[in-house]
Amino acid sequence: MASSVIRPLSRSVNPQEIAFFSKLSAQWWNENGEFGLLHRMNPVRTQFITDKLDLKGLDVLDVGCGGGLLSEGLARLGARTVGIDASASNIQIASHHASTDPSLATTLTYRHTTAEDVLSPPPSSGSGGISIPRQFDAVCSMEVLEHVDDPASFLTTLSQLVKPGGHLFLSTISRTPLAYFLTIFAAEQMLRKVEPGTHTYNKFIKPSELVKFFRELKDEETGKEWIRRWAGSGEVDVRGIVWVPWENQWKLLSRTASEWGGTECNYMFWVRRPEAGPSSTP
């Protein structure tokens, strides 16, 4: 059962954004409807995650899970998955869809809540009969960052939900003229592939801004930097993803790709929390 208790929305959650997606919630599992592009993006998102780790037996949190497109896939790959969303109607749709597959009964849990409330549960929240962890081996938040009001606060909360040595996966949209043209002008206004008003350009975040945030973020337990100045691919990864219309699918680009605009529009981001232990910096 999905919990329905939620505190007043945190400063990172925009009530207008929640209302917007709640209005569309009935369309989540229509592969040819409003969320058709996300259905086709799901294999690429899953590939990016499974390239980094074997999900079997891990505790995974899907923040802003919507109708559960990614959550169900992660659970089927063996992760003990918790999907959360600030929209009650999204959680209702996700829970109903999952209930049609008995194999998900022990591996997938949904909650109507926010990341902040998972980190610090309100006293009256209850557990809905099933307790959920306070930290996770992997935290995912896909196509959510571009909809929050305070990205720094939101990212800090996500980082605190990751276990030491755990993984944080994000996907979002870069703030570039190309991204505006493709995601707002073309997809929303011209082709109507996406509901007009879905995206706000000034909320888009460049990959370099995410890297800078995590370079400056010190682990609260060890004092270590999340991304060291000399970091390699073992600490952070940014990969562009592009829609290929003549193939009717998304493509995950290589780390060094410059074709298709590279990371100038949609992209995936991965960073790993420092392992527990003393800081190596003075």
Image (cartoon, rainbow, N blue to C red):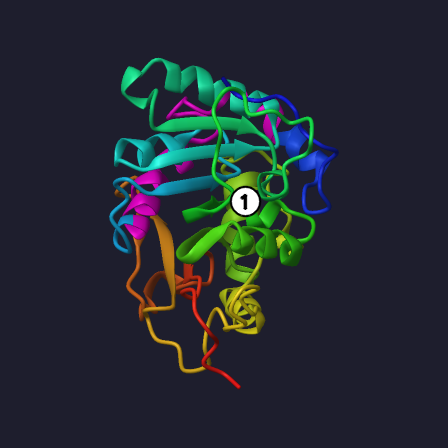
Give percent across and percent down for residue 201: 63, 53
Give percent across and percent down for residue 263: 42, 63
- What span is in magenta? 21-49
Give percent across and percent down for residue 47: 27, 48
- Which residue is the extreme one toward the bottom? 282
Location of residue 113 (image quadrant): top right
Residue depicted at x 52% and y 33%: 84
Q: Where is mark 1, residue-wise? A: 144
Residue depicted at x 66% and y 55%: 153
Residue depicted at x 51% and y 45%: 186
The answer to whether residue 216 is left or right of residue 6 is left
**Other-residue count near label 1 (Cα within 10 Å), few / some / many at <14 / 14–19 / ≥20:** some
Front-lying residue, 169 or 198: 169
Is residue 45 within the magenta segment?
yes
- Residue 185 vs 18, above or below: the answer is below
- Residue 226 vs 51, above or below: the answer is below
Front-lying residue, 9 or 171: 9
At mark 1, the secondary structure is loop
Front-lying residue, 159 or 163: 163
Is residue 33 within the magenta segment?
yes
Give percent across and percent down for residue 7: 71, 32
Kind of residue sitting beneath label 1: Val
Majority secondary structure in the magenta region: helix
- Residue 85 vs 30, above or below: the answer is below
